[in-house]
Image: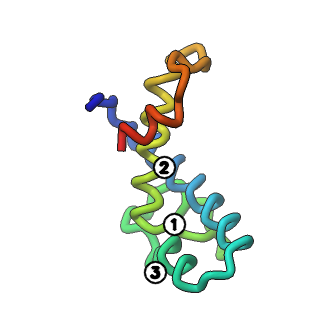
């Protein structure tokens, strides 16, 4: 299993913020109440300095911890596989992602 460099605090905050947008989209196209409940967090982040907490004026969706962990894993794989040039070094990036989580 490949070891990926951990995300910085700001990287984790950015992924959490983007995760909320992903959850908002999925919830808009999904009619499953149980699915929506699993995707959304029932509480606000513990860290009041997080990007999502700072940008929230009452309308943001807070993603569940599981959604954040999944998207943080995806971010680590993408950073590792694209390097600084932004071009994937692996032919099958999706396979690499699933082997990394």
Quarter residue 87 falls in:
top right
Give the camera-side residue of 89 and 48. 89
Q: Residue at x 37, y 68 (%)?
A: 46
Marking on residue 71 = 2
Asked whether the beta carbons under mark 1 and mark 2 sit within 8 Å of each other, the answer is: yes
Q: Which mark is residue 63?
A: 1
Cα–Cα gap, marks 1 and 2: 10 Å
Q: Is residue 1 visible?
A: yes
Residue at left offset 43%, top offset 35% = 76
- Per the image, label 3 sits on a secondary structure element best described as loop
Label 1 vs label 2, nearer the camera: 2
Q: Position of residue 85 (x, y in %)?
A: 59, 14
The residue that appears at 66% across and 72% down in the rendered structure is 27
Mark 3 — residue? 42
Question: Label 1's element?
Answer: loop
Q: Is residue 11 above or below residue 96?
A: below
CA neighbours of label 1 inside 10 A, class few (<14), some (14 to 19), many (20+): many
In the depicted structure, whether residue 36 falls above or below residue 56:
below
- Where is residue 50? Give x, y as percent: 47, 56
Give the left or right position of residue 21, taking residue 40 as reference. right
Q: Quadrant of residue 48?
A: bottom left
Residue 49's x, y, as percent? 45, 57
**Mark 2 burial class by Cα count in 10 Å: few <14, some 14-19, many 20+:** some
């Amino acid at each position: 299993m490949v070891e990926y460099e951990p995300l910085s605090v700001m990287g984790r905050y950015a992924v959490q913020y983007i995760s909320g947008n992903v959850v908002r989209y999925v919830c808009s196209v999904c009619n499953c109440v149980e699915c929506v409940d699993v995707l959304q967090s029932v509480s606000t982040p513990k860290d009041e300095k997080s990007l999502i907490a700072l940008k929230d004026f009452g309308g943001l969706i807070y993603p569940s911890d599981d959604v954040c962990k999944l998207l943080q894993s995806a971010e680590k794989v993408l950073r590792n596989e694209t390097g600084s040039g932004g071009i994937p070094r692996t032919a099958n990036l999706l396979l690499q992602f699933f082997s990394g989580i």
